[in-house]
Amino acid sequence: MPVVQVTTNLSRKLGLDLAKGIINLVSEMTQKPAEGVVVTHRQEFEMYYDGSDDPLAHVRFTSIGMTANDTARYSKGFATFFEQHLGINEQRVVVEFHAPEATHMGKAGTTVAEIKKLIQ
């Protein structure tokens, strides 16, 4: 159940089409079903990086099972996506990674770990 939280200093919303693009990107990168990907977007935040308020994105990406070997590839995927679709220079796309245990992600009143037990 990957979760993508995007914060930008842009005034425009992501919109459903771009959100679906992020969902598909995450599904492809992680090899997890698109149906389980959650995307949130906070816009028009006052954000600064390298002494500038030029367009900027902070992406907080959470995914069970993610390893250190995955993060550079995921970072490149997000940077390329946001540059192509939102015009944010890839040098200004900052990605923060979190890889919780399945016991620390909840859904439908239970945890992912408990759901996995039921389907095995």
Image: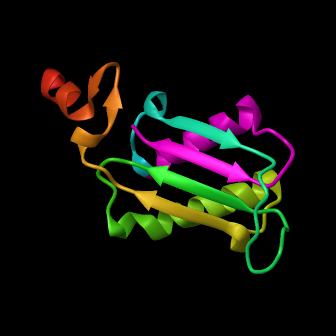
Residue 15: within the magenta? yes
Q: Is residue 54 left or right of residue 106?
A: right
Magenta stretch, residue numbers: 1-29
Picture coordinates of residue 70, whole percent (x, y):
39, 64
Q: Residue at x 34, y 69 (%)?
A: 68
Q: Residue at x 67, y 41 (%)?
A: 41
Query: Taking 97 as reference, is 22 above or below it?
Result: above
Query: Taking 12 as reference, is 71 above or below it?
Result: below
The foreground one among 73 and 68 is 68
Query: Taking 118 as reference, is 4 above or below it?
Result: below
Picture coordinates of residue 39, whole percent (x, y):
58, 38
Q: Residue at x 22, y 39 (%)?
A: 103
Residue 96: within the magenta? no
Image quadrant in which the N terminus is located: top left
The foreground one among 102 and 44 is 44
Quarter assignment of residue 53? bottom right
